[in-house]
Amino acid sequence: MKINPSIRFASLVAVFAVSLSALLAGAQDMPRFRWENFSVASGLPNDHVFCVLVEGNRIWAGTENGLGLYENGTWKVFRPADGLAHQAVLSLALDKRTGDLWVGTMGGLSRISAGRIDNFTQLNSGLSNDIVYGVGVQGDFVWAATAAGASRFNTRTGQWSLFNERNTPMYEIWTYAVSPAEDKVYYAVWGGGVLEYDVKTEHWKDYNDPDGETELVLMKDQGLIHEITTSVSYVDKILWVATYFGASRYDGRYWHNFLKKDSGLPSNFLNQIKGVDGNRAWFSTDKGLAYYDGANWAVYRPALDTHKPEMLVRDASGYVKKIAVQSAPAHNYILGVDFQGDDLWVATAKGLSHGIRQHDSNEHGSKETAEAMPARKLIQQK
């Protein structure tokens, strides 16, 4: 039986219409932001921002030259002259029970408590190394990721515990990030994959790249995507992992890996990953900020060629759409993100960005247009 060409064409158009409708629906559901950016000219201590932490209406920014506190529209700066261990601030963590802020620096670990600053270093405490890449709070314990292994400080007893290649499966001791929770503590170990600490059993376990390749991914979903891990985020019993060669999600049984070529990641080079829950996460890359809702992707950045504000949306079927926006994060090179309700605060290599969530169809209330692939091109591709 021959099919009338006009019917065949109509079917293709119908398929395209359904696909486009799904794309538009996915695009409409992705969060949109109006971005305001802070720099040294605004009062930020330095434009190179390593990390950001939200404490209610107070925003802490760790920079290359001091710790900044943004409150009531003004900045306050903390440097070694004010008691900070070092001017380069690499990581931040808040003890929500006490209000204490823990500050990881290039020269030790600082605690800011009720206006007082106490410093912990190799010389005056059990900290394993003064370069503190990551810090996290778990009940009475403060966990630190340092250049020479992991350290744990019991704030109640004052006792320190050290973890390295002698008492864990850690074959590299350069720990880069830590994510503690009630049941597990995860470390990103540079060149050594991921280290897991079971709180109940006090047992350590490591996760490594199963194919052993340093630059190629031969076994996509068989395990951790790469050994060079930069960040871990454990939320709702789901582990999210960032590496310099892609990202991974682990549910305790199965791994799912993300690469630029088969996901909405703008780059495989990740500095940080931060889970919202078990299905959603934010990815800080060298080519923009990415968001994944479990099916669709969005990327926020200045365009790589024109540097104009850009938002890209990729749906579950792989269709990519450009959304017309009027603002973007301060720079493509994203180092970290934290949440303030529906808003975002983003650390970049050229400033701190505040993403103000827009709940209408666009940033400024006017009708927003979008660019999609021409219908003819989509039909030809099918």
Image (spheres, rainbow, N blue to C red):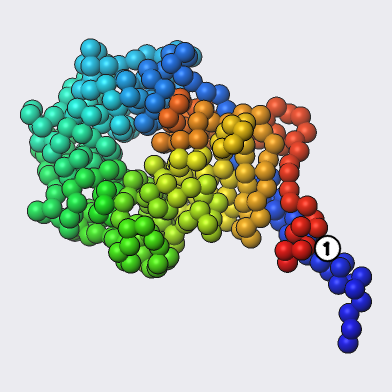
- The image quarter in which residue 252 lies: bottom left
The residue that disc 1 covers is 13
Residue at the extreme bottom: 1
- Can you give x and y, in whole percent of width and height, for residue 184 in the image? 28, 52
How dense is the environment of label 1, judged by Cα within 10 Å: few (below 14), some, or many (20 and up)? some
Determine if residue 200 is in view.
no
Q: Amino acid at mark 1?
A: Val
Q: Is residue 16 visible?
A: yes
- Residue ID at (62%, 51%): 314
Q: In which quadrant is the N terminus drawn?
A: bottom right
200 left or right, relative to 378? left
- Say which quadrant the C terminus sits in: bottom right
Q: Where residue 134 appears, x then y in whole percent?
A: 28, 38
Residue 323 or residue 375, whichever sits in front: 375
Direction from residue 39 to residue 60 in the image, left or right: left
Mark 1 element type: helix
Q: Position of residue 317 (x, y in %)?
A: 64, 60
Residue at x 22% of width, y 26% of height: 110
Check the image and report above or below for 37 versus 317: above
Q: Position of residue 27 (x, y in %)?
A: 67, 47
Residue sitting farthest toward the left: 123
The residue that appears at 78% across and 52% down in the rendered structure is 374
140 displayed left or right of 267: left
Viewed as shown, does residue 151 lie left or right of 92? left
- Residue extending furthest front? 305
- Quarter of the view holding residue 70: top left
Name the residue: 35% across, 45% down: 231
Decide which of 274, 223 is in the foreground and name it.
223
